[in-house]
Image (cartoon, rainbow, N blue to C red):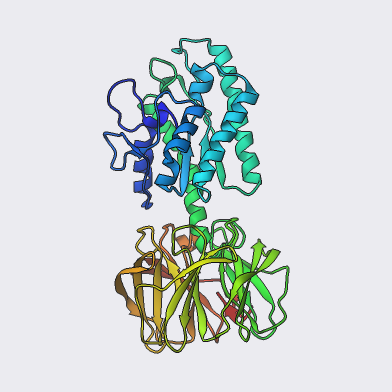
Amino acid sequence: MGDSITFGDLLDNTTRGGYRNYLENMLQIDGVSFDFVGSLSHGDAMNDPQHEGYRGHTMTELTDEIVTRSIVSQGAPHVVLLKIGTNDVVYGGNGNTADLQAKLEILLNAIEAQASRATIIVSAICPVASGFSGDNQSTTQRIVAFNNLLEAEVLSRKASGKRYDYVPADQWLESYFLFDGVHPNEQGYVYLANQWKPALDRFFNLRANLSYGDMDGNGSPDLFWRNSSTSTMGISTLVGGSEASYNPVGFSVNDPNWKAVSHSDFNLDGYADVLFRHSLSGKTVIFFLKNGTKLSGAATNFVVPDTNWEIAETGDLNGDNYPDIFWRHRLSSKMVVFFMRGATKIGSQVPSFSVADANWKSHTTGDFNQDGNKDILWRHRTSGRLVIFYLDGLTKLSSAAMPFIVPDGNWQISQVSPLFGFGGSTDQYPDIFWHHSISKAVVVFDMQNLTRKQVISLPTTLSGVSSVVF
């Protein structure tokens, strides 16, 4: 979203898509599932050319597009890439910091109003080169001041808990410009794509962490333990892809009837939280954590007193990033999903599929086929067979059996999450963490959809820490 540089302008009647073309190629090479959205479509070389880049637009004019045409809400983005300000500062000659600050705030507020859950990644504007027809020195001073303003505003909003990131535009070379000294040439657009890419990598890793158990915010899954006899709890942190450390958490839950049933990032702060359910009353409570420290706790706005209803898993099943709660009745095998916003239930839906055999247990959600939708992994209690339901929301598209079984019922699935480098695994496919209820051993199946690539044993120092893990 932005001006002619987002459009991909090369000062003629055609465009290859500018940085969007090269960014699309980078994401495709990484195997990322994505969709560029927008009401405009330009990019002769692109598979997905939609965008919101308007030639000549200032911040105020872009705000008008958002407000009058609802272009952000119509696209429903998970992430917004914003590069704007060149027409204010360079061509418009605006050096009034207070005026620029006010226009920027109005623009960002308009984006937030139409995409309140989106991450907004803001880029610095580019410098000018010797081909620029204006006063190069004063223009450069205005650009530096504006970029400082941009970065400060992004950091301020990020500090307040909003989802923002900032992309610098340093290390520009004279060779990156067209003859006008303002617009990038193809080499410059490649540079811009390389500037955007790390911010998008951070975004996609965060999205993965929202659904999986990253307790310390380092981008790798962790294990949350609770001893079923003593109720002591701790976190096994996977560090550096080669070893694990164990640390007790900074809080206690002494009533053994409170069972830790799942850990997901319920408040979207980048740290996994813990969902507890009382085995007698059916009450549920979320402990909001940061690196094992309890920041606060909140009772959910519902109670399910029939304890035959069991929490099978948590994960985002309606595409709003917030983890939802998947319930299954132990006797009837009925299923229902509670759509959540933190500790608040905002709705519910019965899935379009059913599984009558109560021996099939659903364990957790993960995007096994990397189509951008969470799927469900099932395991048969007696045979040990494993099956994946591929979903679109709560609609079952298809299913597939894994080409192996785990017949030993003492091996229990504790969680499903990408290893992110642990044991040499570098892909984004969900992997299966197993915990042996007797030996306390932990192993991970390194998966690529249905294919088990390797079996990784976690350090034996974890054995005996506790008897419950998820």
When the figure is inspected, residue 386 is found, relative to residue 296, above or below; the finding is below
Give 19 or 328, whichever is nearer the viewer. Answer: 328
Relative to 299, residue 65 above or below: above
Residue 451 visible in the shown view: no
Q: Nearer the viewer, residue 405 or 122?
A: 122
Residue 7 drawn at (x, y percent): 37, 30
Residue 215, quarter of picture: bottom right
Side of 146 relative to 184 (left or right): right
Is residue 230 among what the camera can see? Answer: yes
> Which quarter of the picture shows residue 428?
bottom left
Q: Quadrant of the N terminus?
A: top left
Residue at horizontal 53%, vertical 29%? 170
Report the number of discs. 0
Residue appearing at x 30%, y 31% in the figure: 16
Q: Position of residue 342 (x, y in %)?
A: 58, 63
Residue at the far front in the pictured view: 68
Q: Is residue 465 above or below residue 115?
A: below
Residue 280 in picture, x, y percent from top left: 62, 86
Q: For residue 404, what is the image quadrant?
A: bottom left
> Residue 390: x percent and y percent?
34, 68
- In the rendered view, does 133 fall on the left or right side of 50? right
The quarter of the image holding the C terminus is bottom right
